[in-house]
Image (cartoon, grey):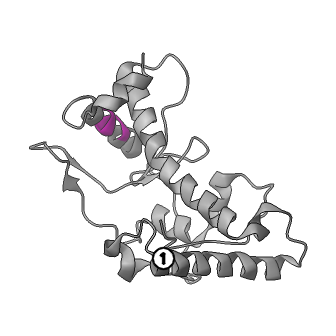
């Protein structure tokens, strides 16, 4: 995977959801200014139109275009399968960070420089990561070649509140899709 947008500079003691909400990307997402494509029909369905979504973990708030797992234990089969499928999607993102850190060992230790300079080091690692991935062709998806860039979007406007009710309905729709038309054989092995 290549990084197509990064936001660097938050302190580790801040909660992920607050960092995201204050980030340029988060502000744009919550004010519906990301120019996300219109919702589309899910594969193998005739009337299940769903929005494009970003995957998140339980630290984030649910939103129309940002889905997080169902909370709690004792979930029904549809919710357990949804959480499993969402987790598989998130693993791809997590793997990109692992590849980045393993390629640039400076990211495995405390970086003993001024915070602003540290931000530049991290940004350089991300740009070099994309360059090496493109050059070496490792799991490189040609469809993302034109969008593989690091962007500075400091001029995004203030963000608004996320739409919880709509996000929960969308999550429920995806959960139902995963146990019906979108089911795959491997998803049942984890719910027994």
Residue 166 colored in magenta in the image:
no
Q: Position of residue 70 (x, y in %)?
A: 48, 32
For the record, the magenta segment spans: 171-175
Q: Quadrant of residue 176?
A: top left
Q: Residue at x 84, y 76 (%)?
A: 115
- Side (left or right) of 44 relative to 8: left
Along the line of sight, the residue nearer the viewer: 146 or 128: 128
Q: Residue at x 44, y 48 (%)?
A: 89
* Mark 1 residue element: helix
- Residue identified by numbered label 1: 136
Residue 173 colored in magenta in the image:
yes
Q: Quadrant of residue 181?
A: top left
Q: Where does the C terminus fall, quadrant-wise?
A: top left
97 vs 9: above or below: above
- Side (left or right) of 108 relative to 1: right
Q: Residue at x 42, y 65 (%)?
A: 139
How busy is the neighbourhood of tag 1: few (under 14 within 10 Å), some, or many (20 plus)?
A: few
Q: Position of residue 21 (x, y in %)?
A: 60, 60
Along the line of sight, the residue nearer the viewer: 21 or 57: 57
Q: Main secondary structure of the magenta part?
A: helix
Along the line of sight, the residue nearer the viewer: 71 or 105: 105
């Amino acid at each position: 995977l290549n990084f197509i947008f990064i936001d660097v500079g938050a302190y580790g003691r801040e909660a992920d959801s607050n960092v995201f909400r204050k980030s340029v990307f988060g502000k744009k997402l919550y004010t519906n200014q990301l120019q996300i494509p219109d919702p589309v029909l899910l594969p193998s369905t005739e009337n299940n139109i769903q929005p494009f979504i970003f995957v998140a973990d339980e630290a984030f708030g649910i939103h129309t275009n940002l889905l997080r797992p169902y909370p709690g234990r004792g979930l029904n089969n549809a919710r357990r399968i949804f959480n499993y499928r969402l987790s598989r999607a998130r693993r791809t993102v997590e793997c990109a960070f692992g590849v980045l850190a393993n390629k640039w060992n400076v990211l495995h230790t405390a970086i003993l420089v001024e915070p602003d300079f540290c931000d530049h080091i991290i940004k350089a690692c991300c740009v070099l990561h994309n360059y090496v991935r493109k050059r070496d062709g490792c799991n490189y998806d040609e469809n993302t070649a034109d969008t593989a860039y690091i962007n500075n979007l400091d001029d995004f406007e203030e963000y608004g509140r996320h739409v919880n009710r709509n996000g929960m309905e969308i999550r429920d729709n995806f959960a139902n899709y995963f146990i019906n038309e979108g089911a795959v054989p491997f998803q049942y092995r984890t719910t027994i």
